[in-house]
Amino acid sequence: MRFYRPPERLSRYFTTFYLTEIDVPGGGRVTDRLHPEWANLRVCRGDYPDSELPGQPHFGGVAANFTGPTSTTLRFTVGSARIWGVGFLPLGWARFLNVQANRYADRIFAVDTEPFLESFRPLACGVFGETADEAAELQRITDYFSRALDSSSEGDDPRIVAVHAALMDPDVSSVSEMAEAAHLPAHTLERICARHFGFTPRLLLRRQRFMRSLVQYMLDPSLHWIGAMDGHYHDQAQFVRDFHRFMGTSPTEYAASPKPVLEAVMRARQEFMGSAVQALDAPTRR
């Protein structure tokens, strides 16, 4: 797993560009679960992953997929493959997609069939060359988004960054506090969150509280769940309810389940980015 920071002029729009290389001996496959995260474009060469989101039909058999912002786990099964990923911050959603995010949240799409993803098809088809060349592949991704940015005439909405910064503040625990921190009326906050973040402010704050707790445990299991719980939880029962809501299982069951991909991903990301998951990436204020 390798992560790359986008160049400075693109950094405010993306979490990272990242390459995952999976080698499963004997032609086998492994299964793991993604945590709730921002939107992602993934382009695969090798064994195409099969994916499952709660309440959605089975998805698989495509080389390029796009996942909207998620508030639940995505279960995936994959064999040996090379997968390039692009993580979109809410400001990146506004810049490069500019459609109503809550219509695409908690869903996964094939890039080659969805009209709202048409602009990404040249990138999906062109990332990989005849042979693996990581530097050249990264350059193609960077060049694509640089050209897309150059061709866009609209400016960025500073309110999106203000909302994102308020969401990231661990002292903000209510919608009213979030609106105050972002210097926005509550109805404007609701509208911006729906369009660019994919969820209501209340659910976004709940997701942040849960992800802070989950990351604490994943990086230091010696804390146990009780020690990893965010301070805004009233009690352990509330945390367990959130665990079922966001991960579809109990904390105990999750801790005991194998994580052949995600454990390595989180530790590599923490070392490189200083945040183990996309949901905890702060906005860049450039």
Image (spheres, rainbow, N blue to C red):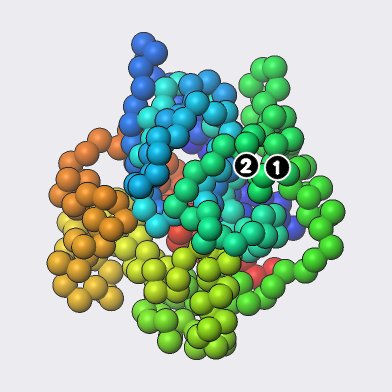
Left/right of residue 209 with respect to residue 224 in the rendered view: right
Q: Are marks 2 and 1 in contact (CB under 8 Å)?
A: yes
> Please, is residue 284 above or below residue 126 in the view?
below
Three-letter code for the amino acid on which mark 2 is drawn:
Glu
The quadrant in which residue 164 appears is bottom right
> Please, is residue 212 above or below residue 140 in the view?
below
Give the image location of residue 209, x and y in percent. 34, 68
Three-letter code for the amino acid on which mark 1 is drawn:
Glu
* Near-viewer residue (113 or 278): 113
Give the image location of residue 193, x and y in percent. 53, 71
For the point 35% across and 17% down, the residue is 28
For the point 26% across and 62% down, the residue is 242
Residue 9 visible in rendering: yes
Residue 227 visible in rendering: no
Give the image location of residue 19, x and y in percent. 55, 35
The quadrant in which residue 258 appears is top left
> Please, is residue 94 above or below residue 178 in the view?
above
User: Which of the numbered marks, if any, corresponds to residue 118?
Assistant: 1
Q: Please, what secondary structure does the residue beneath circle 1 have? A: helix
Q: Which quadrant, please, contains the C terminus?
A: bottom right
Left/right of residue 43 with respect to residue 154 in the rendered view: left
Q: Residues within 10 Å of mark 1 (few under 14, many from 20)?
A: few
Distance in Å between CA atoms under marks 2 and 1 = 7 Å
Q: Which residue is mark 2?
A: 114
For the point 81% across and 58% down, the residue is 152
